[in-house]
Amino acid sequence: MREVAVIGVGQSTFGKFPQRSVVELGREAVLAALNDASVSPKDIQVAYASRLYDVGTMAQAILKEVGISGLEMVNVENACAGGATAFRGVWKDIATGLYDIGIAIGVESMTTSPIARKLIPPAKDDLEGQLGLTMPGIFAILARRQMHEYGATLEDFAMISVKNHHHGCLNPFAQYRKEFTVEEILNSRMICDPITLLQCCPNTDGAAAAILCSMKIAKRYTTKPIKVIGSALLSGDYTYLQKDITISPLGSKTAKMAYEMAGVGPEDIDVVELHDAFANEEMLRYEELGLCKPGEGVRLVREKATWVGGKTPVNPSGGLLALGHPLSASGVRNIAEIVWHLRGQAGDRQTPNAKIGLAHMLGGAVAGLEAGACGIHILAR
């Protein structure tokens, strides 16, 4: 396997843009990544693109807008892990020597997609959903379990949202750049007790792109390439609901696989971007990624260890809660965020002297949907 580097990243501003097509959003991200890498469109040899809804030939539709055609283009979906899946596809093609340089794209327009009709409320043939097993319902159950088992409080969950909205204020790409207090978050509209509106990620439109290449090619474009030292993508089984646990076996197993490939451990990670569709979910991911022992996520929250400037900043971008969550875009976007931190280009949210970062994305993989997908990438400078 060859060493692979990321030499260019880009994203659109995230927000609600019903007047903008997914092609337009994708074009913005791709041009930003090409610009960042100083790569000509004609140099791209392979492309992977992800969009969850109305996929079609997404890569072809976006890349024709920037003059890229006549090469292998693959379109994928993997729920929220779609972008991470596209990134891994390009990584594999380059690591195995099939191609030397390629681009990964993630894009979603949540305001124009049929997601609201398909998932909220559940489809008529979704028996578990009709009985209440919706995403907010699942995480509300997990929140109650965290409170019972580990002593987490409503204020602890709200503080995670406070943190991520604070980080969002530091990010010019974020959908929401507004500070909130614990009281404001707890007093926002109840969605599924104990989860309130400001503890849920918003509907978002946006796109992100990353350019990867072999280390040999990278030296033509930069003296400081960002290496992909760990890559893992797994699906789980259907036994999670039968187990008396809160931590996802899928997340833990994927993290172990990525750490082993990278030759590092959780203690070596300087900055993390992870899936936080709901505030209490972020606490669960601390434990799955090994940032703390099971049940000690509460301690990290109370010590403010995961804030910008803390021991291990988590979601300095604002995360899904404040930056926004255009499903398929998020798995590429969080890689872009890690790249900026490793380069020292993250502005006011910069993690000082960041050397190793981890990007985590989960797709359709909680509770009864454990057989979804988890993608984890570890990058280093």
Image (cartoon, rainbow, N blue to C red):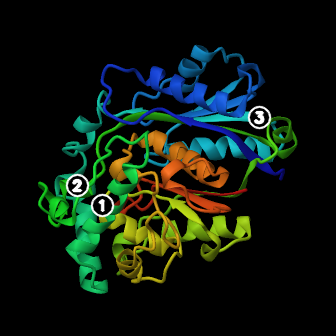
Quarter of the image for residue 138 reads: bottom left
Q: Which residue is mark 3?
A: 101
Q: Foreground mark, 3 or 2?
A: 2
Measure the C-alpha gap from mark 1 to mark 3. Answer: 38 Å
Q: Are marks 1 and 2 in contact (CB under 8 Å)?
A: yes
Residue at the (63%, 61%) spot, across then down: 354
Residue at image coords 49%, 66%: 309
Q: Residue at x 23, y 42 (%)?
A: 123
Label 1 to label 2: alpha-carbon separation: 7 Å
Q: Nearer the viewer, mark 1 or mark 3?
A: 1
For this rendering, which residue is in front, 263 or 171?
171
- Identify which residue, 314 or 113, lies in the foreground: 314
Residue under circle 2?
198
Q: Looking at the rendering, in which quadrant would you find the C terminus? A: bottom right
**Given the image, on which type of amino acid does mark 2 rest?**
Leu
Query: In the rendered image, is residue 209 in sight?
Result: no
Callout 2 environment at 10 Å: few (<14), some (14 to 19), or many (20+)? many
Is 158 situated left or right of 242 in this image? left
Between discs 1 and 3, the one toward the N terminus: 3
For label 3, the crowd category at 10 Å Cα-Cα, with few meaning under 14, some 14 to 19 and many 20 or more, is many
Across and down, in percent, residue 28 comes to 52, 25
Specify few, some or many for label 1: CA neighbours under 10 Å numbering under 14, 14-19, or 20 or more: many
Give the secondary structure at mark 1.
helix
Q: Which residue is mark 1?
A: 161
Count the marks: how many?
3
Amino acid under disc 1: Ser
